[in-house]
Image (spheres, rainbow, N blue to C red):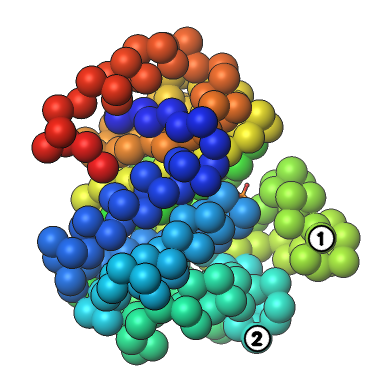
Amino acid sequence: MEIIIQPDSLQASQVAARIVARLVEDKPRAVLGFATGSTPLPLYRELVRMHRESGLDLSAATTFNLDEYVGISPAHPSSYHSYMWAHLFSHVNIAKGRINIPDGLTRDIPAYCRQYEQAIHSAGGIDIQILGIGTNGHIGFNEPTSSLSSRTRIKTLTEESRRHTAAGFGGPEGVPTHVITMGLGTIMDSRMCLLLAFGKKKARAVARAVEGPVTAMVPGSVLQMHPRTVVVLDREAASELEMAGYYTWVYDHKPDWQRY
Ligand code: F6R
């Protein structure tokens, strides 16, 4: 794992955006895996800015989102479809036909999940998967005890996760109980994972995922087994890392050709 610690979430998101932009410049037909939630918002803002001001061209890219709530329509204001269109897709030039977000209204969920996996495979696999992390260590909606080799499937949200998104559904009781999420095995098949975490409330989950044992109790810890994971943090999210000083030193002494 490469750990990059930045003074704040804005600077961290700028580093993350440069990583995504460089990938797309090198490989215009890149397959991008996207996450939702509050964490990637400054990254999406920066990608939109790069598209408008520096010619970042996403017209040949394909995208796959990690997850969607079961039982709500794409048009629901708190669906992850709505989120992605509001924050990214309406403002950049990704072709509509190459955008993939799980369909929360699908009737045959197991068959649909197999098709989603097949679509990722047919697109050539995900080049970079953007990830946030829950305070309980989940990535995607792979809640604690998820199989470390799980594939796209239906999952039941924990109460903690439902509380986290309660505002968009008029309170925790209104939050859907289930989601369709890429599995940990699906995420691990991505050629690169880019995990972002900001704020003090993420510090413990980050420390457990990065420096703790690999365990299904902290699903993000599976990334320790990934050959190319970059973790971009603000200072607060990095505040419980034992080796923070080492990560900072390594980043500050990178040779120019390795810099983002
Ligand atoms: C969202 C997702 C989740 C979030 C996580 C953190 O697509 O897969 O794993 O990344 O719940 O959420 P925020 O960023 O809102 O703290």
* Farthest-out residue, front: 53
Residue 94 lies, in percent from the top left, at 35, 80
In the rendered view, does 23 fall on the left or right side of 145?
left
Front-most of residues 235 and 77: 235
The quarter of the picture where residue 175 lies is: bottom right
Secondary structure state at the residue bearing disc 1: helix
The residue pinned by badge 2 equals 75
Secondary structure state at the residue bearing disc 2: loop
Q: Is residue 27 above or below residue 228?
A: below
Residue 27 lies, in percent from the top left, at 14, 65
Q: Earlier in the sequence, mark 2 or mark 1?
A: 2
Q: Could one spot residue 142 in this view of the protein?
A: no
- Ligand 1 within 8 Å of disc 2? The answer is no
Crowd tier of the residue under label 1, counting other residues whose Cα lies within 10 Å: few below 14, some 14–19, many 20 or above: few
In the rendered view, does 158 fall on the left or right side of 240?
right
The structure residue drawn at horizontal position 80% and vertical position 58%, both measured from the top left corner, is 166
Amino acid type at circle 2 is Ala
Asked if disc 2 and disc 1 are in contact, CB closer than 8 Å, the reply is no
Residue 61 lies, in percent from the top left, at 26, 74
Between the C-alphas of marks 2 and 1, the distance is 17 Å
Indicate the quadrant containing the N terminus: top left, top right, bottom left or bottom right: top left
Crowd tier of the residue under label 2, counting other residues whose Cα lies within 10 Å: few below 14, some 14–19, many 20 or above: few
Q: Is residue 78 above or below residue 233?
A: below
Residue 31 lies, in percent from the top left, at 26, 67
The residue pinned by badge 1 equals 167
Amino acid type at circle 1 is Ala
